[in-house]
Image (cartoon, grey):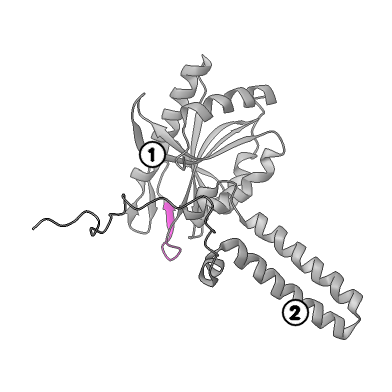
Amino acid sequence: MAISERGKKPSSREQPSQSPFSRPRKPTYGDLIGNRRVRRWARRAVIALVVGVLFALVFDLRVGVTLAIVAVIVDTVRTARLGSSVEAWRKASAVERRTERQLRSLEKKGWRILHARAVPVDEDGVSDGKIDHFVIGHTGLYAIDSVSWDRRLPVRAMSHKRLYHGPKDMASQLDQARWESGQASKLISAQIGFNVPVQASVAIYGPRISWKYLRVRDVDVYSGGRAKRYLRHRRPKVLNNTDIERIAKVAERVLPPTYA
């Protein structure tokens, strides 16, 4: 027996669209609690209230209000410094954000830094490679990978060809970093019209590194906390600000962001 169309429950595609004149749904308590910005300002309000009341009781109301405002400003600045310039990095590793924070001051000196860049293999495809931080500065171009290794295992360099983390030979990771920098160099050089070398490096977080900077398999290896000092370590200036901007524009084109 046929079912009347009138008595048939409409599917989700057949549901009438909401009228533009209907009232929007009011945010629930759960919506507010789940909002990161609301939580952040709620925390600041609590901090301001505690600081304000405490100092108002010890000193006077004016001092309490002033220090409450200062507490909010300090927390706002602290949060801004801990945040990332790349919104999608909020899902990335903490060590990448730590390196990013180190490199921010270089941008004020005319350096250009591109974070989380994919490494294309040809015109149509993109490889699995990713350069965590691509740096264009007065001393040259660098591809930095930030890695987190088990702090309980030692890092040993047996020669300029072998790097071990505990019993594991890290040759494949170094070769990957060297390949990524080589691809970046080829792509940029083809657009610029002359050879533009890119130095590969790995910033290691976790285990103690017994050296400052060491080149293994043509890749510079160092402790993650030295990333900024590594870039400025006793190197001659080979690029001016015009060169940096020109190369940066090419790099932005040929090394697409992985967060897009």
Q: Please provide percent x and percent y for residue 191.
A: 49, 18
Span of residues in magenta:
150-156
Q: Which residue is the extreme one toward the top?
A: 193
Could you say which disc has been placed on residue 79 in the image?
Answer: none
Residue at image x 36%, y 48%? Answer: 170
Residue 21: say if magenta: no
| In this view, 5 is above or below 250 | below
Residue at the location (63% across, 26% down)?
245
Residue 50 image-quadrant placement: bottom right
Residue type at tag 2: Val
Q: CA distance from mark 1 to mark 2?
A: 49 Å
Q: Which residue is mark 2?
A: 50
Looking at the rendered image, the quarter that the N terminus falls into is bottom left
Nearer to us in this view, 176 or 3: 3
Helix, strand or loop at label 2? It is helix
Q: Main secondary structure of the magenta part?
A: loop
Element on which disc 1 rests: strand
Q: Residues within 10 Å of mark 2 (few under 14, many from 20)?
A: some
